[in-house]
Image: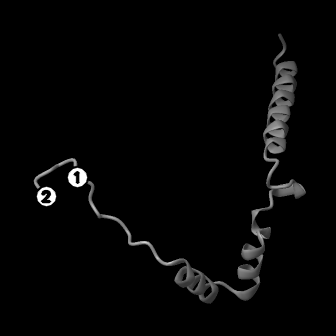
Amino acid sequence: MSADPHRPTTAGPTPVPAATAAADAATTQPAGSAAASAAGEGNELPFGIPPDRPEILVGAAFAGGLLAAIILKRFGGD
């Protein structure tokens, strides 16, 4: 520990070289999942929505909440 309290420290994980990390990932995952993650197919959203359009899910959640509020208001009476 140094005398300067504002000096950055090296208290963190050491970065792993990319070639070693890819080799480790290939040996720890099954062959099918490694190929799927390398191709980018593991990032698919539910219901076949493309990964670059998550706003569709947000809009659907908003519409569902609005519909639920309308239905519950009708059950409540006034």
User: Furthest residue to the left?
Assistant: 3
Report the disc number at residue 31.
none
Residue that appears at 64% across and 86% down: 26
As drawn, 27 above or below 40: below
Would residue 51 appear left or right of 5 to someone viewing this image? right
Scheme of image coloration: one colour
Mark 1 falls on what kind of element?
Answer: loop
Q: Earlier in the sequence, mark 1 or mark 2?
A: 2
The amino acid marked with disc number 1 is Arg
- Distance Cα–Cα, label 1 vs label 2: 8 Å
Q: Considering depth in this image, is 69 or 39 the residue closer to the camera?
A: 39
Residue 11 lies, in percent from the top left, at 29, 64
Judging by the rendered image, the residue that carries numbered circle 2 is 2
Judging by the rendered image, the residue that carries numbered circle 1 is 7
User: Furthest residue to the top?
Assistant: 78
- Quarter of the image with the N terminus is bottom left
Residue that appears at 78% across and 73% down: 39
Would residue 22 appear left or right of 12 to someone viewing this image? right
Mark 2 falls on what kind of element?
Answer: loop
Q: Considering depth in this image, is 48 or 6 the residue closer to the camera?
A: 6
As drawn, 42 above or below 36: above
Identify the image quadrant of residue 62.
Answer: top right
Residue that appears at 53% across and 84% down: 20
Identify the image quadrant of residue 25.
Answer: bottom right
Residue 23 lies, in percent from the top left, at 59, 87
Residue that appears at 14% across and 50% down: 4
Identify the image quadrant of residue 46.
Answer: bottom right
> Pointer 1 and pointer 2: residues touching (CB < 8 Å)?
yes
Residue 56 lies, in percent from the top left, at 84, 43
Q: Considering depth in this image, is 35 or 33 the residue closer to the camera?
A: 35
Q: Considering depth in this image, is 49 or 65 the residue closer to the camera?
A: 49
